[in-house]
Structure formats: C-alpha cells, structure tokens
C-alpha cells in the first residue's frame, strides 16, 4: 500500500481507507494505492466484501487538478475504476462531505453506495472546461436516467444526498460513524447474498424515455445559456454515447471527448480561475499566526442601494445587523427595500416566507449612533463625499467599542484619509462590495496604509463568512476593478466617436464573452456616476489628455440610463430591454465633428482589442504599483465582479495567452495613433521584452 491508502481487515470484510488531505484528490499515489488495494481484496479468498471510506472532511473531491496538462502517469483513473467495478466481491463506497468528479466516478465504480445525509455528490468537471472522463458520463445515466445525468454533468452543480437517493445514485442514507455504517451495510449484503451489482451493466436509466428529445432540448439550452463554451456540448455528446453504445465503446468515446476538452485552451483558463480564486484568499506578507477578531454582530451606516444590500448579506448568513440612517423616513425606506428584495426572492421560489421573516428579524433599524456601541464590525455606505464620510467616521470613533472594525464601502475615495478621521486608523479597512451587494460575489478588501494585520485578516474572514470571493487591494482611485473599468469604458466611448454605435460595441464584447456590453452596463448603473468621476478626475487631468464627450452630452440631455428611460439606449416603461435611442445618432455625429473625426465602420477585433487591452495595460500598472498582490487576483476581480468570461481566465491570463509581445505591439500602435492614454505600462514592456508572462512575474521571478 501507499501512504495515502490503507487496506485493513475487519473480520472477513476488507476496509480500504483513503487519506490524502486536504480533499482526498485522486492523484497518482491514490490511484495506484486504490488499484493495488482492490486487487488484493479481490484475490484474498477469505474477503467477502469491500468497504471504501475516506478520512478527513470529505470523500474524494475529484481527480488531482494540478496534474492536468502534465504527462499522464499510469494507472489512469479509468483503469482503476475498471478494476474496482470488475471486483468479484461486492463493494460499498461510503460517502461523506463531497463526492465530486473522479470521486463520484470511483463511487459509481463501486457496486453499492451509501451517503451520510449531509453529503453532496456531483460531476463539476464542466466548470473546469472538462467532462467526467472516468466513466461518469456512461455510468451516471445508466443509474439516474439521461435527464438527471445531463442536468448534473452540463451544469456541474452538485446535489444533496436525499436527491441522490431519489435518483438511484446512492442506495441508502446514514448518520454517524462512516466505518461503522459501511461495515454494517457490507455485512447485510453478504448475509442477503447480494453480490457485485455493476453500474455499467444497469439499463434502467436508459429505458422508457425519449432520450433523443432530452438530448435535443439540452443542446438548445446550452446554445442559449452557455454560448462560447467548449466542454458543455462535449458533455452532451458523451451522454448521448451512453444512450447508443455498449459500455466499452461508450467509455472509449468519452475518453476521446475528454481528451479534446483537456487540450482546449478553455480548460487551461478555467483551471487557472479555480486556483486563482483559492489563491486570492492568501495574503503573502501576513504572519501565519495572526489572530482573528470574533464577528458576532454587525452594523451598516446608510440604507441606500449598497447599505441595504450589505445588511442583507449579513442577515443571509445569520449575523444580526443594525441599519443606521439619518432619519426615520430614510430608515423606513431602507427597511422597506430590504423587505421588497426578500419578497421578490419568495415570489421567485428561492426563499420561503419563514426564512424571509427570520432574516428580516436580524435587521434592526436605528437612527442613533449610540446603538452601534456593541457592533463587532461597522460598514459605512453613505454618500460618496469626503465631508459626509468624515462626519460618520468621527462619530463611529466616538461610539464604537475598542476593537470594532470600522469599514468603508467607498468606491473611489482615499481610504487613508478616511482612516485619519479616527484615532484608530489601524482598525479601518475598506470593504468594497459590488451592486447588488447581496448578490455579487466579489468583495475588494482595501488595505489602508495603517490597517493592522489582524483587521485585514478578519476582513477577509468576514468576506468568507458572507460567502464572497475576497481580494485584497491597495488604495488608489477606483482600487483595482473600477480603476481598470474606467479605461475600458473610456475606450468604448472613444469608439463611438470613431464611428461605432453602442449596439456594435456591446455586441462585439458580448461575442468575446463579456456578460454585458459596456453601454448596456452604464445604462444600468446610471450615467451620472461616470460623470461625477470624470468631474473629479478632470481637476487633475494633464492638459494633453481628455475624455470622450458622448456621455456628457447624454447627461446634459437628462438621459442618465435606465432610471430615466433613456441613455445609450431607450427603454419602454417597465421593460429593461435596450432599444435604439433615436436621439443618440445626432449626438454621436456632433461628438465626431467637434473632434474633426471622420466616422467610419470599425471591425469587431479592433473594438475588442481597444477595450480589453486597455484593461490589460492598466492591470499591468496596478501590478507593478503593488495595488494587487498578483495578476491572478486581478483576474478573480474581473471574473467575479465584471462579467469577464471565465473561459478566458480573466484579462491578465487572457493577455498571457495572446502573448505579451503581441499585446504590447497593439498597445504601441494605439499609443502612436490615439495618444497618451495608451502609454505602455513599463511592466508590460519589460515582460514582453523578456518573453515572460504576468503569471510568471507574480511568481516573483
Ligand atoms: N485537486 C487538487 N486540489 C484540490 C482539488 C482537486 N480536485 N479540490 C480542491 N483542491 C485544493 C484547493 O486548491 C485548496 O488548496 P489550498 O488550500 O492549497 O488553496 C484545498 O484543496 C481546499 O479547497 P477549497 O478551498 O476549495 O475548500 P472548500 O472546503 O471550500 O471546498 C471542495 C472543497 C468542494 C472539494 C472544492 O475544493 C471543490 O469544488 N474542488 C474541486 C472539485 C472538482 O472540480 N472536481 C473535479 C475534478 S476534475 C475530475 O475529477 C476529472 C475526472 O472526471 C477524470
Ligand atoms: P445611495 O445614495 O443609494 O445611499 C446612500 C444612503 O446613505 C442614503 O440612503 C442616505 O440617506 C444615507 N446617508 C447619507 N448620509 C448619512 C449619514 N450621515 N448617516 C447615515 N446615513 C446617511 O448610495 P449608494 O449607491 O448606496 O452608495 C453608498 C456608498 O457605496 C458610496 O460610498 C458609493 O461610492 C459606494 N458604492 C456604490 C456602488 C453602487 O453601485 N451604487 C458600488 C460600490 C460602492
């Protein structure tokens, strides 16, 4: 046996124990150990049954993702599972935690499966740009039916144990000790004379339904909901093979399709996203023994768009939260907004009435700062004006208990200046939520000059508690996400002056994979936000730079986006579908004329490069200034806060994959033609000259 696999005997039952922290991934040693253990159990004449149990917090969570892209090492997972399924003694997989990907495939290779009632099972490979490549696409439909298998494999979403039982993926649920449950079940099998029952030989799931219709419907759904993704269509093709081919041929087809996915650039990008997200939670220069402050109660100042969303985020995770407003009228508006948001979820069926009332009961409205004295963390979300922030932070400093974390949700103001309004700047941190704060996963945790290690680490823990993806950023105008998006939006608008329409720019970027085009996005958030930012930035803008003017023209005409019924697009009352705004064309022509630009048709690649490379060039500056810890953190911000396509891995990974020399060449061309907004970032020039990538630089080379 290997270190990670132990084979023990409990009477005439062989117990195979897997111990490969943290998630029992099926790396080479585990595969080899499982193969040997099952072979030994099979060949030992006195063994009557085999029980497979994992130690630690979870069953096997899948293949070892770090091995993808490296030379394969025998035995492969399909080979191991073939041996497991072929065993002549009945085997039981005992599932706790999560049986995911290759982990569930191993369990499906076993003859019986029991699951602790809080366990989950799933085939999430599609999220990594893959498909289940060790028999999952062939065995799951045979047990659970084609409909359920397609749903699980194409969405990648795990299901709970009770649902798995309902769909014949597991045979029984249990509570309590894993080994005890496994041995009891195995003894029962032996007593009842039940031998091996191989998933690959089952047919129940394939019969009695119009599988072709199910497959057609899934194709239509994928075309609509997952455009541009490579692996979902291959997932469907693999399940289709299960409906048409005998097991051995189906497995062969699955392998071919798996290899196609493995070799696709999307797999690399999605696996980058997986590790980038986990890496983002780590702060390089923080001592490992830093203490976390307990967070039991919270408070939010300001019951507007953001404040209410932040209060909901706390209530959603069971943390009591006080919501403070300037007066009772504003407070009631905020509380009403909280109730309406939950009521909409109840209406959609994603929340029960009871849960809504429980969560609302956690939100207490107040108008007196004295009520915040016991809060462990206070998040300020008042107007974006330094004077107002000053008033709020001075009052917080006066009333909050020692050790309370004082956080600001400012999107662009200087956090160090805000911290200086208090006598405890080490307790001040930025918690920059994204709108709607109760929905968006991203949280930029802004580390001020004086923020203490303890406060920073606790702020990251708060993010985790709120189920956010938290990324540490430094202080600068717009932090990471918005600072980059200013460049992106500005270039998108310059394209309007060159001859494009909002429809063309939005379509080009959607085709690239962005969840939304920049102009539909601006209409959604309101054009006045950008106008206020430009007003502030103009004060310090060098004379040779200027902003495009279309947005200012729309603002001057009172067209602020969806909230006024028109912006770059026009909106019918009660309908958010963008229509052409007939008042825009003369404004575009005027904007071009004023700058002496002859309008011309622009091609899609030019539109995409102009916007995306603007992100990349600014990202390079941010990296070099140390505002982001690593390039993958910038990717995480864009993937979780700005609708950047996951299959491209984020703007910095995308630039690496295009080649930094090519990106730099385009940036230089644009610099020569469009002026100093395009001054190449020194880091981009350096890495391109050295033939390196942003990812390599983050590794500190
Ligand atoms: N391979 C390698 N490392 C893995 C891993 C895997 N499959 N799954 C998790 N890890 C690592 C993480 O990178 C992290 O490492 P770190 O501590 O060094 O950052 C550590 O395990 C803990 O992971 P999380 O922080 O994500 O822990 P959680 O408790 O929040 O979540 C989990 C646990 C639900 C298992 C989650 O990690 C997860 O979803 N993992 C991925 C599961 C997956 O995608 N499996 C399919 C793999 S592909 C496959 O099986 C192909 C097959 O069909 C042939
Ligand atoms: P908002 O205008 O919707 O809400 C602000 C609320 O603060 C109002 O309800 C107002 O009554 C209240 N308020 C003002 N002064 C107060 C005081 N002294 N004490 C208590 N309450 C007070 O503004 P919004 O959009 O919620 O923004 C709040 C903060 O969040 C700003 O700093 C903004 O930059 C930031 N932010 C906004 C995002 C957005 O998309 N709207 C995204 C991320 C951050």
Image: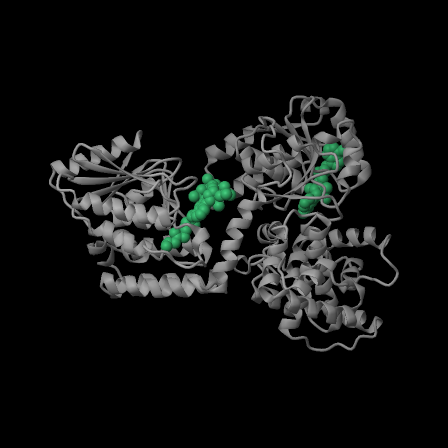
Residue 493 lies in what quarter of the image? Answer: bottom right
At x 37%, y 52%, the residue is 152
Taking 393 as reference, is 579 above or below it?
Answer: below
Residue at the right extreme, as displayed: 543
Question: On the picture, is 8 further left or further right than 681?
Answer: left
Q: Up-down: is 379 above or below 106?
A: above
Q: At 41% across and 41% down in the image, what residue appears?
A: 23
Residue 129: percent from left, percent from top: 45, 58
Question: Number of callouts in the render?
Answer: 0
Q: Residue at x 49, y 62 (%)?
A: 266
Residue 28, given in percent of the width and then of the height, sits at 37, 50
Residue 583 shows in the view: no
Instruction: Using the image as rendered, state which of residue 348 and residue 300 is in the foreground.
Output: 300
Q: Quadrant of the N terminus?
A: top left
Whole-percent x and y of residue 368? 72, 24
Residue 202 is left or right of residue 554, and the answer is: left
The type of colouring in the image is: one colour
Instruction: Identify the residue at image location x=49%, y=54%.
Output: 271
Is residue 390 rendered to the left or right of residue 241? right
Foreground pick, 124 / 322: 124
* Residue 620, visible in the rendered structure: yes
Q: What is the x, y in percent for residue 415?
A: 75, 39
């Amino acid at each position: 046996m290997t270190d990670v696999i132990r084979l023990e005997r409990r009477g005439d039952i062989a117990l195979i124990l897997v111990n490969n922290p943290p998630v029992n991934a099926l790396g080479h040693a585990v595969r080899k150990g499982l193969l040997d253990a099952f072979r030994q159990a099979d060949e030992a004449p006195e063994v009557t049954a085999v029980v497979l149990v994992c130690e630690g917090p979870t069953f096997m969570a899948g293949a070892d993702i770090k091995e993808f892209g490296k030379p394969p090492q025998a035995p492969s997972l399909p080979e191991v599972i073939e041996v497991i399924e072929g065993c002549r003694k009945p085997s039981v997989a005992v599932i706790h935690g999560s049986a995911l990907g290759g982990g569930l495939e191993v369990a499906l290779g076993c003859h019986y499966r029991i699951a602790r009632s809080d366990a989950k099972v799933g085939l999430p490979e599609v999220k990594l740009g893959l498909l289940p490549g060790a028999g999952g696409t062939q065995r799951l439909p045979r047990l659970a039916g084609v409909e359920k298998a397609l749903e699980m494999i194409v969405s990648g979403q795990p299901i709970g144990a009770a649902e798995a039982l309902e769909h014949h993926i597991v045979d029984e649920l249990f509570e309590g000790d894993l080994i005890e449950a496994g041995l009891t079940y195995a003894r029962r099998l032996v007593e009842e004379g039940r031998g091996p029952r191989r998933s690959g030989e089952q047919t129940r799931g394939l019969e009695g339904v119009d599988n072709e219709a199910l497959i057609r419907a899934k194709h239509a759904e994928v075309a609509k909901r997952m455009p541009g993704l490579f692996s979902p269509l291959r997932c469907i093709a693999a399940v289709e093979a299960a409906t048409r081919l005998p097991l051995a041929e189906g497995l062969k087809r699955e392998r071919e399709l798996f290899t196609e996915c493995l070799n696709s650039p999307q797999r690399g990008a999605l696996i980058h996203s997986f590790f980038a997200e986990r890496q983002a939670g780590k702060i390089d220069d923080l001592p490992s023994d830093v203490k976390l402050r307990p967070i039991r109660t919270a408070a939010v100042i300001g019951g507007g768009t953001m404040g209410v969303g932040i209060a909901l985020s706390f209530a959603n995770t069971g943390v009591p939260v006080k919501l403070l407003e300037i007066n009772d009228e504003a407070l009631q508006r905020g509380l009403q907004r909280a109730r309406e948001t939950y009521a909409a979820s109840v209406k959609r069926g994603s929340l029960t009435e009871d849960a809504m009332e429980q969560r609302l009961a956690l939100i207490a409205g107040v108008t007196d700062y004295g009520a915040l004295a016991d809060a462990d963390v206070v998040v300020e979300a008042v107007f974006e004006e330094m004077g107002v922030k000053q008033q709020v932070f001075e009052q917080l400093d006066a009333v909050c208990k020692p050790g309370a974390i004082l956080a600001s949700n400012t999107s662009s103001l200087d956090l160090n200046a805000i911290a200086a309004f208090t006598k405890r700047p080490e307790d001040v941190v930025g918690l920059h939520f994204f709108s709607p704060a109760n929905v968006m996963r991203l949280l930029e945790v802004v580390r001020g000059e004086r923020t203490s290690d303890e406060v920073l680490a606790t702020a990251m823990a708060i993010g985790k508690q709120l189920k956010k993806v938290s990324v540490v950023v430094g202080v600068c105008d717009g932090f990471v996400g918005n600072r980059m998006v200013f460049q992106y939006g500005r270039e998108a608008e310059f394209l309007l002056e060159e001859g494009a329409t909002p429809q063309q720019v939005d379509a080009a970027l959607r085709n690239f994979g962005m969840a939304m085009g920049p102009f539909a996005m601006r209409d959604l958030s309101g054009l006045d936000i950008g106008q206020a930012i430009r007003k502030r930035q103009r004060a310090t803008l060098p004379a040779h730079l200027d902003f495009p003017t279309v947005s200012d023209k729309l603002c001057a005409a009172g067209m602020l986006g969806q909230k006024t019924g028109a912006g770059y697009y026009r909106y019918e009352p009660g309908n958010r579908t963008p229509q052409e705004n007939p008042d825009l064309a003369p404004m575009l022509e005027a904007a071009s004329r004023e700058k002496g630009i002859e309008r011309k048709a622009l091609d899609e690649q030019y539109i995409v490069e102009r916007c995306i490379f603007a992100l990349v060039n600014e990202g390079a500056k941010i990296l070099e200034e140390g505002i982001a810890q690593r390039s993958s953190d910038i990717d995480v911000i864009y993937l979780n806060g700005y609708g950047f396509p996951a299959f491209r891995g984020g703007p910095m990974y995308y630039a690496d994959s295009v080649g930094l020399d090519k990106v730099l060449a385009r940036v230089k061309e644009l610099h020569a033609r469009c002026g100093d907004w395009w001054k190449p970032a020194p880091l981009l020039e350096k890495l391109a000259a050295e033939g390196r990538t942003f990812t390599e630089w983050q590794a500190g080379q």
